[in-house]
Amino acid sequence: MQNEVIAYKKGQNLVDTQSINPQEIPNSKEILFDNSDDSLEVIRHSCAHLMAQAIKEIYKDAQFFVGPVIEDGFYYDFRIQEKISDADLKAIEKKMQELAKKNMKIEKINSTKAEVAARFADDDLKQEVLLRIPDGEVSIYKQGDFEDLCRGPHLPDTRYLRFFKLTRVAGAYLGGDENREMLTRIYGTAFADKESLKAYMTMIEEAKKRDHRKLGTELKLFTFDEEVGAGLPIWLPNGSRLRSKIEQRLFKAHRVRGYQPVRGPEILKADAWKTSGHYDNYGENMYFTEIDGSEYGLKPMNCVGHIKVFQNDVRSYRDLPLKFFEYGVVHRHEMSGVMHGLFRVREFTQDDAHVFCTPEQIKDSVIEMLGFVDDIMKSFGFEYEIEISTKPEKAIGDDAFWEAATQGLKDALDEHNIAYGIDEGGGAFYGPKIDVKILDALKRKWQCSTIQVDYNLPDRFDLSYIDANNEHKRPVMLHRAILGSFERFIGILIEHTAGELPFFVAPTQAVIIPISENHVAYAKEISKKMLEIDIDTEILSKNESLNKRIRNAEKMRVPMILVIGDEEIANNSVALRDRRDRKQYNLTIEELISTMKEKLSEVHF
């Protein structure tokens, strides 16, 4: 089956063999049965239907909502009287294997919306799906005695479906609305060959060990509390030290690059959000309240505050580019079902910046920003890829703005021979953007840094600067974040390093272990000297064996372990264990201070 044609691509659209006319084939690209992105989309879409068919055979009362392909797999939402757990997945997989071996042809049935509504008249979930489909032709895919509403694409038959795995059971609100009923959701994945599936499952097992929620608890970095509310992280002392170290380094990095620190309020009148377009285009993601008879909105972004800083003074072309940055706390209304540790929260802090410049300065500003991104990502050990995201369906501003802004980004990258992909329709509602997607140790992609070109907000807020001819001109606004948010980036960093955080941001950089009570005073002296050079330490002086305390330090994933006894006190030294380099040696206090300073200076951004 390898390299058999399973579908075609016409422009940006995948079309299955059931949908394409023979005369159209010469103008289309063949999609072969392999592990390419296009092929996997077809394979996984069909595997979702195979899973639904198996569920229907085991649980006769099952009713199905939607079953889309997602990154790395697929899921299906359905209603069922029984309670399904992860323990039931093997039985469903077994039934899927049985069905796949029947080599059932996957048929496409085209119909009208009215006919399909009548066909599924007794199924309220299908009626819900139909409400989300535009009027016109509607398709149903059928295999054996199972059929479901679907736009495709699908494989020609089920014989291709051999290498799949169901990964977990979850709950999901109907249509993502937390006021609607909770459906059952099963996630799974599929590949074209056994080796790829095995490699993926190995990666999943490793990811479980690296889960930032698990490590965040073990390392006492952060916590969540139901009494406080979902999606609102509480930073513990260890996590706060970690955040603070990143913030301090990043603050200095901004200053040396000419950025000015500013701060906008966290709550603004709704009128400001109406002017910016957030009220109409992003309002469902915001929190609103009323104060003194006026409507206010908690900020989901920092751009309006920075616009007000720009407007606070008369600006000359000599001032540009003008760079403002802020560690801005923002709030976004996330559904309870999508929140996930630090990756998806309702309150987070962006390392946000806005650069106001002339159109001619866009290229240089973008390249300078990408250099900043490169310095930081390399310091943390991340590789990355770049994409340009273009005009989304929901956008403000006319096409001329969008074309000029998008072309400006392309020109900047092209002139510096920087490779990039295109994410059609992935831009912000006010402008196109460059997205930087970092690759972690498991080769998973995470979108963090973003650079957005915006002609719209300067126009909406009537921003201007005085040019060389003493005339008012409209600036361009560049939105920029490098980490994205401190919360999400720290979650990614924890998983990337498996908790072995880089020395320069480790919450505790050294654990000091006095062999006996007689050595505690000396340990405190060392701890004080370390703090003077910005090295955080912890003294393990409990009445436990030396080996146990060393094991506890290992579990804390602390880079350095300093053991002190009579000999170390006599020699004004320490016995150092470097966990990262797997070395042990003795250093005088002066040599220890020098070593620590050297390690802190290894990273430059």
Image: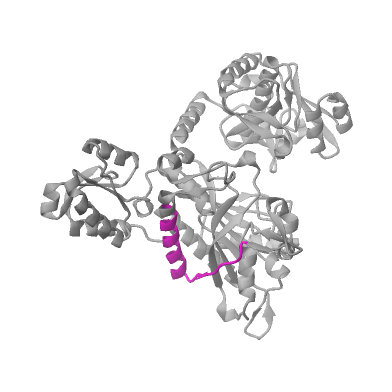
Asked if the magenta segment contains residue 408, the reply would be no
Q: Using the image as rendered, state which of residue 136 and residue 32 is in the foreground.
A: 136
Residue drawn at x 45%, y 59% is 247
Residue 532 drawn at (x, y percent): 29, 62
Residue 509 drawn at (x, y percent): 32, 51
Left/right placement of residue 160 relative to residue 591 reads right
Residue 315 drawn at (x, y percent): 61, 79
Q: Using the image as rendered, state which of residue 496 and residue 421 is in the foreground.
A: 496
One can see residue 362 in this view: yes
One can see residue 381 in this view: no
Determine the residue located farthest toward the bottom in the rendered image. Answer: 470
Residue drawn at x 66%, y 18% is 54
Query: What is the quadrant of the C terminus in the image?
Result: bottom left
Against 532, is 46 above or below?
above
Q: Using the image as rendered, state which of residue 561 and residue 210 is in the foreground.
A: 561
Left/right placement of residue 204 relative to residue 562 reads right
Residue drawn at x 79%, y 38% is 132
Q: Which region shows up in magenta?
A: 242-266
Which image quadrant is residue 115 in?
A: top right
Against 367, is 503 above or below?
above
Secondary structure mainly formed by the magenta segment: helix
